[in-house]
Image (spheres, helix red, strand yellow):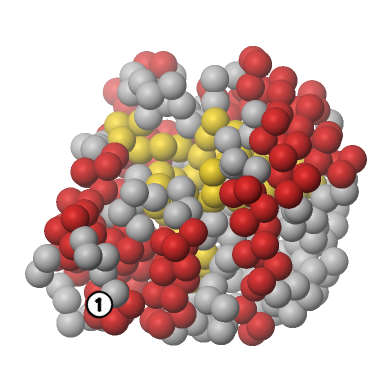
Amino acid sequence: MEWARRSLTGPPLTGAELEVALGRDTPLLSMIQEAYEVRRTFFGNRVQVHILNNAQNARCPEDCGYCSQSAVSEAPLRPYSWKSQLELLKEAREAYDAGAYRYCIVASGRGPTTKQVRHVAEAVREIKRQVPVQVCVSVGIVDEEMAGILKAAGVDRLNHNLNTSEAHHPRICTTHTYGDRLSTLRAAQTAGLELCSGLIVGMGETDRDLVDLALVLRKLEVSSIPVNFLIPIEGNPVQSDGSLTPERCLRVLAMFRLANPRAEIRAAGGREGHLRSLEALALYPANSLFVYGYLTTTGRGPVDTYRMIRDAGFVIERADGRIAPWAELGLDEAFRVGGTEQILKPEVRTQVG
């Protein structure tokens, strides 16, 4: 097996080879080791922590069947409009204090107005002036002018997930196209923003769908790939397809690492519930993760997450490149006493934010 060597030195792995990597004929630990060799080459033993801020909730006209904020979801969310710039700044400080490398401002909706983009831009300017954290913005479909405003304000990355392959996209959303999403990513690239674009696994896609998406992201040279595992929220039209065993989740993470060796691969939404007892193994292909939660669902908090990172032999990286001492994160005492946080079962919050 020479997947790691091919991923690092070429020629790049083909779609057919990546499909084989997803299959169960290859021993799981062998595949994880191959992915880890690539991860270690570019990221060492460092882990980047991301914290999401749900800046606008449940006011979306789109019909994305996997999303509890969409117009077709019956999930019991409390809608609210844009948070103020002071709120976004305050929560950026809190994210940094909790260990965040990157603070992610996310707003529901098809896309923002120019006024809303300028609102985010002003908040980001102040965040970048006061808080030493990277900033990613995810606000739906944007054009080159909007992307340029965000870039000028200091936004580091724009997130816009492709979510699945072009062939599978009409089965999860019909109010916008796969091409609309690609256009947003290209607008961000033109403006000089780094790209963050990922997927949701467990929506009925095939291995070929996953590989096709991995290859599209490789062609776009996407810097950050969040790999989400579908959280089956009651009230959403799209529910779990039953495929998400811990083994399956790890194989998907490893395949995306081998296909996109230099990208930040993130074990994102649903990692706690789907990886279960094998969660720490996700750190071997992936070099980043979220703490606290995923916009409308809860997740694992920092103490247990950082304990898992430390116990697996990894360290937390700050946005300035430093390794964060555990004392800096206020966790020395928590580690000494050996207690554990309650792990929350993902569920819809009635109030978000």
Residue displayed at 54% across by 43% down: 194
Q: Position of residue 240 (x, y in %)?
A: 54, 77
Question: Does residue 22 appear left or right of residue 328 in this picture?
Answer: left
How many discs appear? 1
Residue displayed at 75% across by 53% down: 142
Question: Is 207 drawn above or below residue 190 in the view shown?
Answer: below
Q: Position of residue 252 (x, y in %)?
A: 36, 68
Question: Does residue 212 appear left or right of residue 110 in this picture?
Answer: left
Secondary structure, mark 1, is helix
Residue displayed at 67% across by 23% down: 127
In which quadrant is the N terminus drawn? bottom left
| Residue that extends furthest to the left in the rendered view of this protein | 1
Q: Position of residue 347 (x, y in %)?
A: 62, 59
Q: What residue sits right under mark 1 in the picture?
A: 17
Question: Is 189 drawn above or below residue 50 in the view shown?
Answer: below
What kind of residue is marked 1? Answer: Glu
Nearest to the observer: residue 77 or residue 33: 33
Question: Is 214 drawn above or below residue 280 in the view shown?
Answer: below
Q: Which picture quadrant has residue 74?
A: bottom right
In which quadrant is the C terminus drawn? top right
| Residue 339 appearing in the image | no
Nearest to the observer: residue 107 or residue 350: 107
Question: Is 2 drawn above or below residue 40 in the view shown?
Answer: below
Q: Position of residue 159 (x, y in %)?
A: 60, 50
For disc 1, the neighbor class at 10 Å (few under 14, some 14 to 19, many from 20) is some
Q: Which picture quadrant has residue 62?
A: bottom right
Question: Does residue 1 appear left or right of residue 252 in this picture?
Answer: left
Nearest to the observer: residue 291 or residue 331: 291
